[in-house]
Amino acid sequence: MTELISMRPLDAWESALAGQPCEVLRSDGSLVPADIQRWSGMPDAADHHLLVDPCSGPTLDVGCGAGRIAEALTTRGITALGLDVSPEAVRLARERGASAVRRDVFGQVPSEGDWQETLLADGNIGIGGDPVRLLRRLRDLMRPEGTALVEVDGPGTGVVHDVIRLRVQGRITGTLPWSWVGVDAVAAVAAEAGFLGCDIRRFGGRHLARLTRREAS
């Protein structure tokens, strides 16, 4: 039986952030539970090691969700701003003490060109379905000597482009472009976007690419 499209992706995401179970439906029919509980919880050791501790200056958390990373940075004394298209995400982030604004990363962003670090955690390199375009946008937002910290998938993933739908409480959304980039492919994607340096870090089964405009000396 064909499921009827009955909600927008943003509405589904809002419901998921409010506590409703959410599944990601890929074009091949496979279903993957969205890990909302982890994304909305407290930062774990991998979050601190890979995303929080490396930040040394003003940091922009793109697709901040409920704000766990932005809050942790603020607690460390780092100026941090969460960016998300979801009003519920921004509300939750602010509620926990993080600074956050409702913006599209491809639109007008505060302090453009003056961020020391930009973050794409939790697979957010998939935003918009075009990782090269997204990474180029991060370059625009960063200082010339800045760093992009990008969480990626494990070995063997390569680069996957797809259209996904979200399912919440038996209701399903229209399609949403999304991409996955593996640790084995991120250097090539980053180079196409203008990042010459790509340092891979691993912790707790997670993978992070530290991207810079200049190659590491």
Image: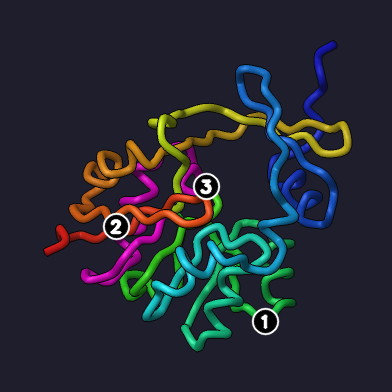
Q: Which residue is at 70% across, 43% downward? A: 34
Residue 103 appears in the rendering: yes
Among the 4 quarters of the image, the one containing residue 183? top left
Which numbered marker is on residue 107?
none
Q: Position of residue 182 (x, y in %)?
A: 41, 38
Please give the residue where the numbered disc 2 appears in the rendered image: 211
Q: Residue furthest bottom?
A: 77
Q: Amino acid at mark 2?
A: Leu
Identify the secondary structure beneath mark 2: strand
Q: Earlier in the sequence, mark 2 or mark 1?
A: 1
Is 140 included in the stretch rendered in magenta? Answer: yes
Q: Relative to 74, is 197 on the left or the right?
A: left
Instruction: Give the class, few, some or many, for how many residues have Cα within 10 Å of label 3's Cα (few <14, many ≥20).
Output: some
Q: Earlier in the sequence, mark 3 or mark 1?
A: 1
Q: Amino acid at mark 1?
A: Gly
Identify the secondary structure beneath mark 1: loop
Q: Which residue is at 82% across, 20% downward? A: 3
Q: Are marks 2 and 3 in contact (CB under 8 Å)?
A: no
Please give the residue where the numbered disc 3 appears in the rendered image: 123
Q: Nearer the viewer, mark 3 or mark 1?
A: 3
